[in-house]
Image (tube, rainbow, N blue to C red):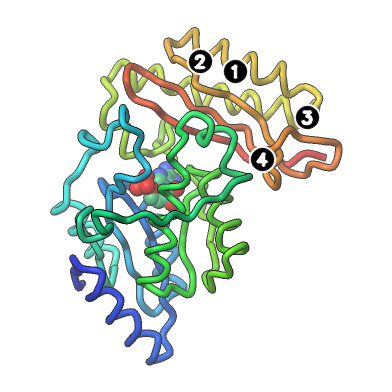
Amino acid sequence: MILFRTKAELARFAAETKRSGKVIGLVPTMGYLHAGHMSLVDTARSRADVVIVTLFVNPTQFGPTEDLDRYPRDFERDKKMCEEHNVDVLFAPDANEMYASDSSTWIEELDLANPLCGASRPAFYRGVTTVVGKLFHLAQPDFACFGLKDAQQCFVIERMVRDLDFQVEIVPCPLVRDEDGLALSSRNRYLSAEERQRALSIHQALLAGRKELEEKGFAALDEICRKAIDSITAAGGRVDYVEGLDRATMKAPTADSREILLAAAVFFGTTRLIDNELVQVK
Ligand code: AMP
């Protein structure tokens, strides 16, 4: 595995790889890798000649009061995991390398990014789309893998690619959970044993919501979300949102909706966790 720290090295490598006609698969991450990330890497490995993983805790997607400084990092462990999964290139720049100090240009998606995490974290998606756009320019991937753990993020990036004509296929990958149902996340590291146990209520509430949504349809959505909020709150969570939106529009579902994203963001202690279920409706 080759490690690059600079954009120039990555760009040169990508240009040469493209010239030789090889397929490049990209997996952007913020590191502190777990089995969820590695499932994306394995998907990329199965389809690409060259797999590039990026490891960058992107400051522009964190708000001023958020956890940028304490975001978990373990470079040596991440590097070992990438080697074990046959990654070809690990790109791990620092923030000064990634952004000019007077950087003043953004990529902003202004529709799908508005609700849910976009409403709670105003600068978040602008930071995500900007850094992903930069990574696409540098790595020139044929495809890039994104996890449905962050379903809204995946849909925002699909829209960005469509609207700005990036020649990159977006490959959505299934959400990976721990055995007890908790969605894997680098931020699970912050949870005490008791908070982690209580946090199982998120998945349980969303599963109950899925069942009811499948049975009753979108007309029952308000009641379904209310129940989910009540049960998560009873387990000690501070709910940021539980909402069901049309997957295609990220707006309130209508009779035409085919798939509903039932999504939750919840604080346990100071840790904000997100989870979701994608539900087919009749
Ligand atoms: P992050 O490092 O949290 O920014 O995540 C990097 C990529 O891994 C994103 O595309 C995430 O959606 C994906 N990812 C993170 N956790 C999971 C998970 N539990 N299951 C599937 N994909 C995940």
For disc 4, the marked residue is: 250
Label 4 vs label 3, nearer the camera = 4
Asked if one can make out residue 36 in the rendered structure from this viewpoint, the answer is no
Q: Secondary structure at mark 2?
A: helix
Residue 174 screen position, x and y as percent: 52, 50
229 or 56, nearer to the observer: 56
Q: Relative to 166, is 259 on the left or the right? A: right
Of helix, strand and loop, which one carries label 1?
A: helix
User: What's the residue type where badge 1 is placed?
Assistant: Ala
Kind of residue indicated by mark 3: Phe
Cβ–Cβ under 8 Å for marks 4 and 3: no
Horizontal and vertical percent position of residue 121? 45, 33
Residue placed under numbered mark 1 in the picture:
228
Q: Earlier in the sequence, mark 3 or mark 2?
A: 3
Q: Which residue carries the number 3 mark?
A: 218
CB atoms at circles 3 and 2 under 8 Å apart? no
**Which residue sits at x=41%, y=76%?**
24
**Crowd rating for badge 2 (residues with CA inside 10 Å; few <14, some 14–19, many 20+):** many
Circle 1 residues within 10 Å: few <14, some 14–19, many ≥20: many
Q: Are marks 2 and 4 in contact (CB under 8 Å)?
A: no
Provide the secondary structure element on which disc 4 rests: loop
Kindly state the secondary structure of the residue where label 3 is placed. Answer: helix
Q: Nearer the viewer, mark 1 or mark 4?
A: 4
- Mark 2 or 4, which is nearer the eye? 4
The mark that comes first in sequence, 2 or 4, is 2
Q: Amino acid at mark 2?
A: Ile
* Residue that label 2 marks: 232
Neighbourhood count class around disc 4 (C-alpha, 10 Å): few under 14, some 14–19, many 20 upward = many
Between residue 207 and residue 75, name the one nearer to us.
Answer: 75
